[in-house]
Image: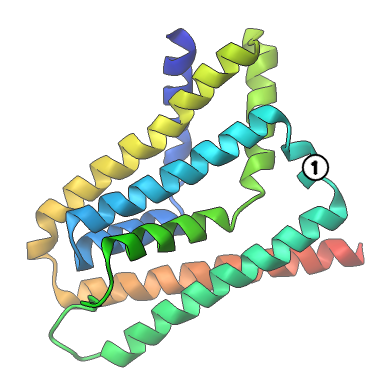
Amino acid sequence: MREFRNGLLTGLTLQLAIGPVFFFIINLSLQKTILDGFAGVLGVTLVDYLYISLAILGIGKVLKKKKVKNIFGIVSSTVLIIFGFLILKSVLETVGMSKTLIDTTSTIKGSFLSVFLITLSSPMTIVFFTSLFTAKAIEYDYKRKQLLLFGLGTGFATFLFMGTSVILFSTIKGTIPVLLIQTLNGIVGCLLVGYGGLRLWNVNKEEKS
């Protein structure tokens, strides 16, 4: 199980690079229920495992082709921007309200799907995992089976880190003012729009080069 442990430690280190998905999941925990938060955790974990599996299978090499990479880049960036604008729209519509921004018509399934789609919109993660696993295979002389164990550990780190964060924020959410939650919503929306816009700019730049 040494490979699993190495993957877990590597994954936990990677989790320290907090991104939009983390804030989105925390937002779900604060505005809805702990189950919605864990539905989001399940969504991001499943996508991570999907991309880890594809990386081990070598699909990352296909995405390194410029044309394929650009298509995925445009589609995925657009998805992020749309999600971001929808969140910002909800913030603007609820400014000054004393209630939280929770959508009482949404479901746990909706929480899962929203996180799943946002995480899925970053297919270049496969290229990252491919590079990571290649480096580890060379460093530790890992074979396919050992890489699988390493990948299991890396993916479990996502569930462990995100799940712990959901429990923590769900425990203290009663003490968090509505204004702070609205601010967090705005941050999440801006991060998604900004990240998606930056990726679109990079894709356009690569096409011209």
Residue furthest right as drawn: 209
Quadrant containing the C terminus is bottom right
Name which residue lies at 48% across and 37% down.
14
Left or right relative to 106: residue 57: right
Residue 162 vertical position relative to residue 54 in the rendered view, above or below: below
Q: Is residue 36 above or below residue 196?
A: above
Q: Residue at x 39, y 70 (%)?
A: 187
Disc 1 on helix, strand or loop?
helix
- Specify the farthest residue to the left: 174
Specify the quadrant of the image occupied by residue 67.
bottom right
- Residue 111 is situated, as x and y percent measured from the top left of the image, at 33, 62
Q: Residue 123: horizontal and vertical position, in percent?
A: 64, 50
Name the residue rendered at 50%, 18% in the picture: 149
Q: Is residue 150 left or right of residue 5?
A: right
Name the foreground residue: 8 vs 51. 51
Residue 108 placed where, x, y %? 27, 61
| In this rendering, position of residue 172 left or right of residue 191 | left
User: Vertical placement of 44 versus 67: above or below?
Assistant: above
Residue 64: image quadrant is top right
Question: Residue 31 in the image: x percent, y percent?
Answer: 21, 68
Report whether residue 10 is seen.
no
Q: Is residue 201 above or below residue 142?
A: below
What amino acid type should be assigned to the residue bearing mark 1? Val
Image quadrant where residue 163 sits: top left
Query: Residue at image x 24%, y 78%?
Result: 101
Residue under numbered circle 1: 62
Left or right? Give the position of 18 relative to 26: right
Q: Where, quadrant-wise, is the N terminus in this rendering?
A: top left
